[in-house]
Image: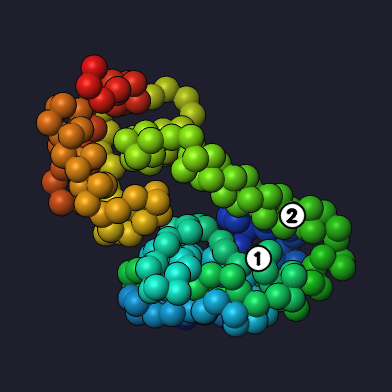
Amino acid sequence: MDIAKFNIPRYLATQPMFSNMQPEELQRVARGCVLERIERGKVLFRTGEMSQAFHIVVLGQVKLCVISPAGVEKVIELCGPGHSFAEAVMFMNAPHLVNAQTLTETLLLTVEKNAVLREIEADSRFALRMLAGISRRLHGLIKDVEGYALHSGMQRVISYLLRDLVDAGGAVPQSIIVSLPVSKSTIASRLSLTPEYFSRVLHELETAKLITVQRRDIHIHDTAKLAGYLPGK
């Protein structure tokens, strides 16, 4: 992709928080944006650093994580194409609570705080759309905590593999292929599992003939049977 030819206003219009804005409004916001191609493994910000912008992943993958005093990493969120992050902390005038790092070569759109504040002052509806986006992220985090507390490791892995079907709604296909966007160890951390346990779960599901694992591609043979799988039954 040629960054010089990338149409930032048109891309912003595809994002829920910007979708109802007029062309001239999108042009104003675009002037406060920076589009960068960032190499794999780049730290975008660290815990404790102040924020003056939020970010949208155009292409690639970014992980949000925290590091324990013992040096153990816990992945909080995986942000793929179309996902935004760091909106809330930008408005709070508070330091980041997590680290952000690219997991692949990433095309990242950074939206400066002042550009957002100008539009909020001009149109209160824009503030409501920003609030809706932040609320969706909070709801997702609450669901994650619920899953960690109430669901077994097996249930978490199955839910992760079937997540796109739940999000899409409509008719559910019998068989699908899920391509893991990042390493199994990163996904395990995201699900609050050890890499070893995550691998054991995949092996058990493969032994039960519910899936076939080919590197990062997970072939799900019957989505309904996988959703209803109970170990030992």
Residue drawn at point x = 46 percent, y = 43 percent: 148
Along the line of sight, which residue is nearer the eye, 218 or 233? 233
Q: Is residue 205 visible?
A: yes
Q: Quadrant of the C terminus?
A: top left
Q: CA distance from mark 1 to mark 2?
A: 9 Å
Vertical order, 78 against 107 (above or below): above
Residue placed furthest toward the top: 233
Q: Secondary structure at mark 1?
A: helix
Instruction: Estimate how packed mark 1 is, as few (under 14), some (14 to 19) or many (20 or more) residues with alpha carbons within 10 Å.
Output: many
Q: Is residue 183 left or right of residue 212?
A: right
Q: Residue furthest front?
A: 70
Residue 23: x and y in percent read 71, 63
At label 2, which amino acid type do we have?
A: Leu
Name the residue tied to disc 2.
Answer: 131
What residue would you read off at disc 1? 87
Report whether 105 appears left or right of 65: left
Colour style of the rendered protein structure:
rainbow
Residue 224 at what x, y percent from top left?
32, 21
Q: Is residue 6 above or below residue 163?
A: below
